Image (tube, helix red, strand yellow):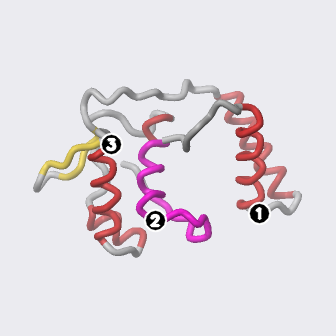
Amino acid sequence: MLEFYLDRHAGIPTYLQLVQQVGHALRVGALHPGDRLPTVKEASAQLAINPNTVLKAYRELERGGLVEAHPGRGTFVRVGVAVPAVPDHPVLRDQLTAWVDRAQAAGLSADDVVALVNTAVRRSYPQRTGEVA
């Protein structure tokens, strides 16, 4: 099951962080159609946030057609959702992990690494218009 995390320094509203994490999990194949998301109670307890924040994220995901709520059972990734899963590239993943480890050893913060990656993505993908879901 997906485990949410929060970056309290990201400057992104909490509910949008949850929405983005579901989209990213779908993209990389960590979530699949039919998978259940954490309950509102589970997610709010895990993250120590107001349950209404989780509800807002889940409603946004439902409006976007990615999930559907089943009262009494939970919120599930919609069956039939086209999952543009990223193919597994173990070599690239290992190289990226090694690069992040070197960046950390060089004294870069997580925010520094994210800024560098975002800059590289914008430079390499100038046609990209929106945030990756």
Secondary element at image label 2 = helix
Q: What is the CA distance from the residue labelled 1 to the residue labelled 3?
A: 33 Å
- Label 2 CA crowd tier, 10 Å (few <14, some 14–19, many 20+): many
> Is residue 57 on the magenta stretch?
no
Based on the displayed image, in which of its 4 quarters is residue 82 positioned? top left
Q: Secondary structure at mark 1?
A: loop
Q: Residue furthest right?
A: 106
Q: Depth-wise, is mark 3 or mark 2 nearer the camera?
A: 3
Q: Nearer the viewer, mark 1 or mark 3?
A: 3
Judging by the rendered image, the residue that carries numbered circle 2 is 14
Closer-to-camera residue (87/22): 22
Q: Mark 3 — residue? A: 64
Question: Residue drawn 55% across and 24% down?
Answer: 87
| Mark carried by residue 109 | 1
127 shown above or below 41: above
Question: Residue flagged by tag 3: what amino acid is it?
Answer: Gly
The range drawn in magenta is: 4-24
Callout 1 amino acid: Ser
